[in-house]
């Protein structure tokens, strides 16, 4: 069992690190996880 199963997830990626869509792709491989927000931001 994964600790993200049956959860809602908010993803904030980093422009110079790992972007939001890449994290979302990984999270979508887990069953019963709902991504409610995914974004890539620039933290300066």
Image (cartoon, grey):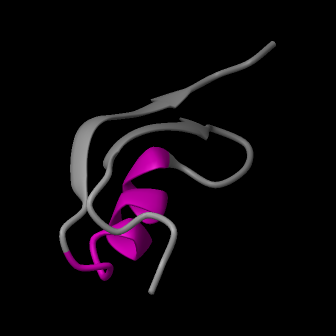
| 3 shown above or below 8 | below
Estimate the x, y position of residue 7 in percent, counting from the top left: 32, 52
Single out the residue that lies furthest toward the top.
Answer: 44
1 and 8: which is toward the camera:
1
From the viewer's perspective, is 37 left or right of 16? left
Q: Which quadrant holds residue 16?
A: top right
Q: Residue at x 63, y 55 (%)?
A: 18
| On-image quarter of the N terminus | bottom left
| 43 shown above or below 19 | above
| 42 shown above or below 44 | below
| On-image quarter of the C terminus | top right
Q: Does the magenta-highlighted stretch encompass residue 30?
A: yes
32 and 22: which is toward the camera:
32
Q: Main secondary structure of the magenta part?
A: helix
Q: Residue at x 46, y 47 (%)?
A: 20
| 37 shown above or below 16 | above
Estimate the x, y position of residue 11 in percent, counting from the top left: 45, 40
Magenta extent: 20-31
Estimate the x, y position of residue 8 in percent, counting from the top left: 29, 44
Q: Which quadrant holds residue 21?
A: bottom left
Estimate the x, y position of residue 19 in percent, counting from the top left: 53, 49
Q: Residue at x 74, y 18 (%)?
A: 43
């Amino acid at each position: 069992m994964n600790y993200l199963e049956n959860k809602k997830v908010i993803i904030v990626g980093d422009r110079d690190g790992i972007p939001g869509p890449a994290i979302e792709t990984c999270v979508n491989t887990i069953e019963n996880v709902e991504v409610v927000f995914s974004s890539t931001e620039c933290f300066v």
